[in-house]
Image: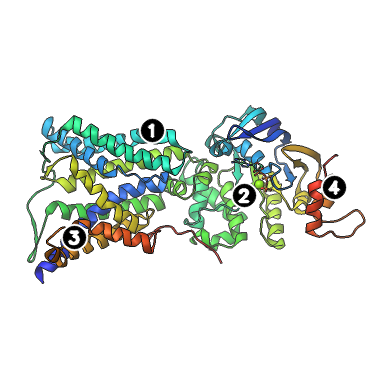
Amino acid sequence: MLSLLSYVANGALTGLLYALIAMSFVIIYRSARVFNFAQGEIVIVGAFLVWTFMSAFDLPVWVSVPLALLSSLLLGVLIERLILRPLVGEELFAFVMVTIGLLIFIRGVVLVAWGPEVRFFPAVLPMAAVKVGPLVFDRALVIGAAVTLVVAAAASWFFNRTQLGLEMTAVAEDHQIALSLGISVKRSIAVAWGISGLLSTLAAIIFLNGKGMTFLASDIGFAALPVALLAGLESIGGVVLGGLIVGIAVGLAAYFLDPIFHGGVAAVFPFVIMVVILLIRPTGLFGWKTIERI
Amino acid sequence: MLLELNNVEVVYSDVILVLKGVSLSVEAGQIVALLGANGAGKTTTLKAISGLLRSEDGKVTGGSIRFQGVPIHAEEPQNLVRRGLVQVIEGRRILPHMTVEQNLLVGGKVQKGRVERRQMLDKVYGYFPKLVNLRARVSGYLSGGEQQMLVIGRALMAGPRLILLDEPSLGLAPMTVTEIFELVERLRRQEGIAFLVVEQNANVALAVADHGYVMENGRIVLYGTGPELRENEDIKEFYMGMSISGHGKSFKDVKHYKRRKRWLG
Ligand SMILES: Nc1ncnc2c1ncn2[C@@H]1O[C@H](COP(=O)(O)OP(=O)(O)OP(=O)(O)O)[C@@H](O)[C@H]1O
Ligand SMILES: [Mg+2]
């Protein structure tokens, strides 16, 4: 019983980490209608940036982390400028191909720049486990869950309450209306890529804190996809709930199904959920459905 | 002259010639009607002016467009909005998942700051008191008339000198249409805003318009003051469904007639 509770609670925490990555995905999708398959790679670049500043250059945490966050923000803006903006007006298919191309390209660059060997990601966050009664949690995940909730609340406030955020929401709704009201759609999309890059590095720190990593850690990007789809691709609040649902479901699968199938079910479970969602409700649970007045 | 088009040509996708030399002008504080059959190029004309054409792979390939004397055919829409030229796109295009007030605030993008934006918001609520009670409502659920009020109010938020208004009467009840045109007239009178209005409903449009143009096939084929056009037999035939003999024609007859009739033929 106790261990079931532990699986569920840890699943929820992991789910919130997925939610953070899903959020970086959703922020781009909302603005640009671009489904960024390379999101996981951007997380990994963020991770290697932190590693480089801290472990290779020996800079202190309080310099390295802001520097990595800033660099990943610039990386996001740069990717938009150089790779996606020239495609504006092209078919959806072009965007799908280009983000898949981006995935392969970044993976190559990471391999060349940082090599295939295992690196130890510095412990940016404290490592000591958190004990709540009889339950034990990874401290980075607990901090990460709090960060995710704060970021989601901040994003929700930003997109609904501030002028720049409202303008970005307008871009998410309809590029042509946004243009007609004097909003620079290009700038909005660039800002979205920047925010997304920054969130990716934040997620990398939580995900890899004090662990060994290789370029393959980018698979986390795929684990976040079901969360984004469940949320409906547009809703920031939905991403948090989606993360909790997927995380807890994975926890339950690990507890009940892994013993039966000798492991492995939990790892693919997010994708099982994703397929089920796409079959039943392609717009996700909290996404923008077309409003149809009767 | 506030707005002046001289022999404007527009091509879509580099091959489809849609405007074949359109000339028209709007003076400060004027209401000008742009009439014409479906596909005549009215919307294209407005988009050529507002700069939205480029987002649809359209290009001004000839002639000149001047706003307040300055050529604007290569200007980004955001700069034009800042200078006081706003288009209200046809089809009541609200931002459906945003509230009424959020829609309006977005429209106030080019305002200098928060204070100016709030002042403008109060002004818009003054002109559209119905929107006050709906301010927190998700705009996708408003009625058609309310949505039309909202998109005009949203354009107003930019503090424009000229509003390009595309088919505001589309799909609305006659009473709502009257209400909207009364508002247009009031905005012109009290705020000095000029309007270039595209309309199928020639009757209401010409009732408030200082002058009007009729387009056919990418050209201006008729020009006159509001009263002149209202008395023009062709216009009566096409838009008001009245024949010279005084018998009302059915819409179908008029449509059929419209197809073979040539303006100024
Ligand atoms: N993006 C586009 N690409 C190619 N052709 C277009 C495009 N937009 C409009 N057209 C064509 O240009 C012509 C004029 O269209 P436009 O929308 O300007 O007409 P309109 O007078 O506004 O008609 P309506 O009264 O039906 O709104 C039409 O034949 C239309 O098919
Ligand atoms: Mg039109």
Element marked by disc 1: helix
Quadrant of the image for the C terminus of chain A?
A: bottom right
Q: How many marks?
A: 4
Residues under numbered marks 4 and 1 in contact, where contact means CB atoms less than 8 Å apart: no
Q: Where is residue B191 drawn, in percent x and y?
A: 65, 45
Tell me the mark number nearer the camera, choosing from 4 and 3.
Answer: 3
Q: Residues within 10 Å of mark 1 (few under 14, many from 20)?
A: some
| Residue A58, numbered circle | none
Question: What whole-number distance in Å separates the C-alpha atoms at marks 4 and 3?
Answer: 75 Å
* Label 4 CB less than 8 angstroms from ligand 1: no
| Residue B90, numbered circle | 2
- List the single residue furthest toward the front: A261
Mark closest to the chain's N terminus, 1 or 3: 1
> Which residue does the numbered mark 1 point to in the structure image?
A81
Q: Chain of mark 2?
A: B
Q: Chain of mark 4?
A: B
| Residue B234, numbered circle | 4
Mark closest to the chain's N terminus, 2 or 4: 2
Q: Is residue A281 left or right of residue A258?
A: right
Amino acid of disc 1:
Arg
> Which residue does the numbered mark 3 point to in the structure image?
A265
